[in-house]
């Protein structure tokens, strides 16, 4: 389907904010693969948790792992970037294997009304998980432009595509797609043919920001100008080394703290760590580096921290 050109679409491929190129060239990948990786444990045996009831809260947010959160609201329950498969890669046989199970078992999920899908990378857009959700809950999937064919191929009936700053017309809660500085690809041949985004969720007077997958860029201040006050921000802190390769697609913890400050949220929660070894840093390094970044920027731990896998926070 043809689309008009914009400041982030050249008529064929999508671009980053202000027209910046998206991702590293494939010629850089062999050098990246030669980088020395800090070993991760093969498996961490965390006990699964059961999501708590809403019990009058305006929202309950539960960290399932990586970029998957369950956001329970009276208007409907939402999953972000649902990923329940063993591997993040083609056919679930290639790509990195998860080192801990999803912190909430699929069969313990409450009814899911909507899925927010930030982009098409395998660790965020998992077709088997989408298929299970389609069979169990028939949810609406809200995704950036160009992702409808992939999502429909998983068995999802209802898909709503959004451009940056567009709001959903079909979601049970108000959802607006926000810019992100990243890229898309499922194969070597479809790079940046689909858009990537974050999301701003508005429900019962709350505003929850889910950053998706992103490098640090000035658009965080734009999100704050449009949507402040933001009550809770979900911000990636992992998969950032080596910086020569990853700086154009993922924030490190120091940049994540800067994004938190740009957003002005009273509380941020780190994500995108401790589940799949996508890059070279150790499994615990993002959390340690986040603590150091908080110290350098004089941010109290209560303002920006991580949740234990399966832990929840209540927004009242």
Image: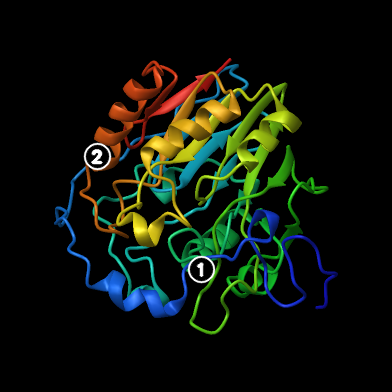
**Residue at x 46%, y 47% (from the top left corner):** 68
Quadrant into which the N terminus falls: bottom right
Which color scheme did the rendering employ for the protein?
A: rainbow
**Which quarter of the picture shows residue 196?**
bottom right
Inter-mark Cα distance, 1 to 2:
25 Å
The residue mark sitting in front, 1 or 2, is: 1
**Which quarter of the picture shows residue 228?**
top right
Question: Neighbour class for label 2 at 10 Å: few (<14), some, many (≥20)?
Answer: few
Task: Point out residue 20 in the picture as x, y percentages from the top left corner.
Answer: 62, 61
**Residue at x 72%, y 23% (from the top left corner):** 204
Nearer the N terminus, badge 1 or badge 2? 2
**Residue at x 68%, y 46% (from the top left corner):** 178
Which residue occupies the foreground of this view, 174 or 262? 262
Task: Point out residue 294 in the picture as x, y percentages from the top left corner.
Answer: 36, 24
Task: Point out residue 80 in the picture as x, y percentages from the top left corner.
Answer: 54, 47
Q: Say what secondary structure mark 2 lies in.
A: loop
Reading the image, the residue beneath label 1 is 127
Which residue occupies the foreground of this view, 73 or 116? 116
- Residue 203's label in the rendered image is none
Reading the image, the residue beneath label 2 is 47
Q: Is residue 74 visible?
A: yes
Q: Is residue 141 visible?
A: no
Quadrant into which the C terminus falls: top right
**Residue at x 34%, y 54% (from the top left corner):** 243
Which residue occupies the foreground of this view, 270 or 61? 270
Q: Is residue 232 left or right of residue 42?
A: right
Question: Neighbour class for label 1 at 10 Å: few (<14), some, many (≥20)?
Answer: many
């Amino acid at each position: 389907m043809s689309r008009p050109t914009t400041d982030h679409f050249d008529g064929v491929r999508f671009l980053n904010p202000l027209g910046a190129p998206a991702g590293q060239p494939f010629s850089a990948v062999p050098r990246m693969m030669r980088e020395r990786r800090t070993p991760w444990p093969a498996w961490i045996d965390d006990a699964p948790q059961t999501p708590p009831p809403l019990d009058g809260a305006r929202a309950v947010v539960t960290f399932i792992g990586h970029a998957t959160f369950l956001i329970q609201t009276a208007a409907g329950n939402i999953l972000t970037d649902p990923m329940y498969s063993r591997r993040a890669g083609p056919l679930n046989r290639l790509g990195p294997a998860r080192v801990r199970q999803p912190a909430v078992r699929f069969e313990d999920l409450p009814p899911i009304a909507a899925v927010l899908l930030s982009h098409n990378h395998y660790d965020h857009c998992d077709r088997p998980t989408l298929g299970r959700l389609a069979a169990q809950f028939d949810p609406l999937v809200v995704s950036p432009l160009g992702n409808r064919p992939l999502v429909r191929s998983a068995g999802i009936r209802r898909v709503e595509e959004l451009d940056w700053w567009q709001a959903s017309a079909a979601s049970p809660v108000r959802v607006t797609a926000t810019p992100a500085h990243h890229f898309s690809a499922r194969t070597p041949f479809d790079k940046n043919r689909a858009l990537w985004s974050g999301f701003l969720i508005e429900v019962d007077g709350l505003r929850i920001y889910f950053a998706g997958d992103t490098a640090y860029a000035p658009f965080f201040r734009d999100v704050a100008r449009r949507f402040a006050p933001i009550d809770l921000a979900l911000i990636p802190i992992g998969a950032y080394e080596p910086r020569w390769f990853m700086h154009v697609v993922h924030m490190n913890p120091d940049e994540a703290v800067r994004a938190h400050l740009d957003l002005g949220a009273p509380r941020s929660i780190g994500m995108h760590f401790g589940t799949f070894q996508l890059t070279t840093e150790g499994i615990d390094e993002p959390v340690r580096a986040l603590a150091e970044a908080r110290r350098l920027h004089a941010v109290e731990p209560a303002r920006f921290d991580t949740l234990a896998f399966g832990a929840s926070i209540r927004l009242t």
